[in-house]
Image (spheres, helix red, strand yellow):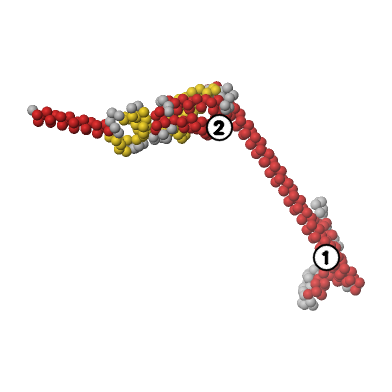
């Protein structure tokens, strides 16, 4: 009986010791921190890892998540500076920096952050026009983040991001905005079309101008070349006349025959090529024409040498042997 009573006592002591050890050993997971209270007063913070506390004297006050967390901000109605009613919601990202402050400086940390964010959304958006709300979300997010982060610093919390998810104007206002946008786009389209027509007219006029200039330059070049051709023709005629005059002065019968034959043939050619209807009776002084052509043959004979053949016309259709 004595042994049995001693055994029970030993087992009881062992059970109490194991209970105290179990109560005194605390394991803190990664990403969390525990606050320790001694007789209800905060004493220290347990970091991730294995820790020992005094059973029945020390106890865990709060278990704080130290990782970045996200909370949805409920939708709410906001009146803008130009008296437009819009429905707004968002999301806030935050991270606890000081576990003791988050546990003992504010009651219900998440609710406090949500209410603080909603209040500042109404403040910031209420000071802006509707057009600014719809086009400057980055500015709104930056202002909200600055205000909320400054207010939560005392709670040991760092607000990392605040994003406005949706801004929903009333239906009638959306319809008005759609009509305004359509009118603005129609206006821009009309302006672009008018600008295109203006550019097309300018290019067309420029093309016509260049065409006129080129045409005038072409006419000037043609006139210049015609004048040059006439000048050369006149020079040639003058030279021929001069040579003929010299031949006449020397009494050259062949030159006289050449001159007469040339004028006679030219007159006969002009008469034959005139557009008026005519009837020509041959011979019409054909002997004079033949004689003139014979003079031309004599000139050619003098030029090309004594052995040049005499033209059949000049010899009455016979060839000299």
Specify the quadrant of the image occupied by residue 255: bottom right
The residue drawn where x is 82% and y is 67% is 293
Q: Residue furthest toward the front?
A: 2
The residue drawn where x is 80% and y is 60% is 228
Q: Position of residue 269 (x, y in %)?
A: 81, 59
- Which residue carries the number 2 mark? 135
Position of 276 relative to 111 (above/below) = below
Mark 2 crowdedness (10 Å alpha carbons): few <14, some 14-19, many ≥20: few
Secondary structure found at label 1: helix
The residue drawn where x is 32% and y is 38% is 49
Q: Is residue 13 left or right of residue 70?
A: left
Mark 1 crowdedness (10 Å alpha carbons): few <14, some 14-19, many ≥20: few
Q: Quadrant of the C terminus?
A: bottom right
The residue drawn where x is 68% and y is 44% is 203
Position of 61 relative to 268 (above/below) = above
- Foreground residue among 180 and 223: 180
């Amino acid at each position: 009986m004595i042994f049995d009573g001693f055994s029970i006592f030993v087992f009881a002591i062992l059970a109490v010791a194991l209970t105290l050890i179990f109560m005194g050993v605390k394991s803190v997971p990664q990403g969390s921190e525990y606050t320790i209270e001694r007789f209800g007063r905060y004493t220290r913070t347990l970091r991730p890892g294995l820790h020992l506390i005094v059973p029945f004297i020390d106890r865990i006050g709060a278990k704080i998540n130290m990782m970045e967390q996200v909370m949805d901000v409920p939708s709410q109605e906001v009146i803008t500076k130009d008296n437009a009613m819009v429905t707004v919601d968002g999301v806030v990202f935050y991270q606890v920096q000081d576990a003791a402050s988050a546990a003992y400086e504010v009651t219900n940390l998440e609710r406090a952050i949500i209410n603080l964010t909603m209040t500042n959304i109404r403040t910031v958006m209420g000071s802006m026009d509707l057009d600014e709300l719809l086009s400057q979300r980055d500015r709104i997010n930056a202002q909200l983040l600055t205000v909320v982060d400054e207010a939560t610093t005392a709670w040991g919390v760092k607000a990392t991001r605040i994003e406005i998810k949706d801004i929903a104007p009333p239906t009638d206002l959306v319809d008005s905005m759609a009509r305004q946008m359509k009118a603005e786009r129609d206006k821009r389209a009309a302006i672009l079309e008018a600008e295109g027509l203006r550019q097309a007219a300018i290019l067309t006029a420029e093309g016509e101008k260049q065409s006129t200039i080129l045409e005038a330059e072409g006419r000037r070049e043609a006139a210049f070349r015609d004048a040059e051709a006439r000048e050369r023709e006149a020079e040639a005629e003058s030279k021929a006349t001069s040579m003929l005059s010299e031949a006449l002065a020397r009494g050259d019968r062949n030159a006289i025959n050449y001159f007469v034959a040339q004028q006679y043939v030219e007159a006969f050619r002009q008469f034959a090529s005139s557009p008026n209807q005519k009837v020509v009776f041959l011979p019409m002084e054909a002997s004079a024409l033949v004689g003139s052509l014979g003079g031309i043959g004599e000139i050619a004979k003098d030029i090309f040498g004594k052995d040049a053949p005499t033209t059949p016309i000049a010899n009455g259709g016979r060839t000299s042997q």
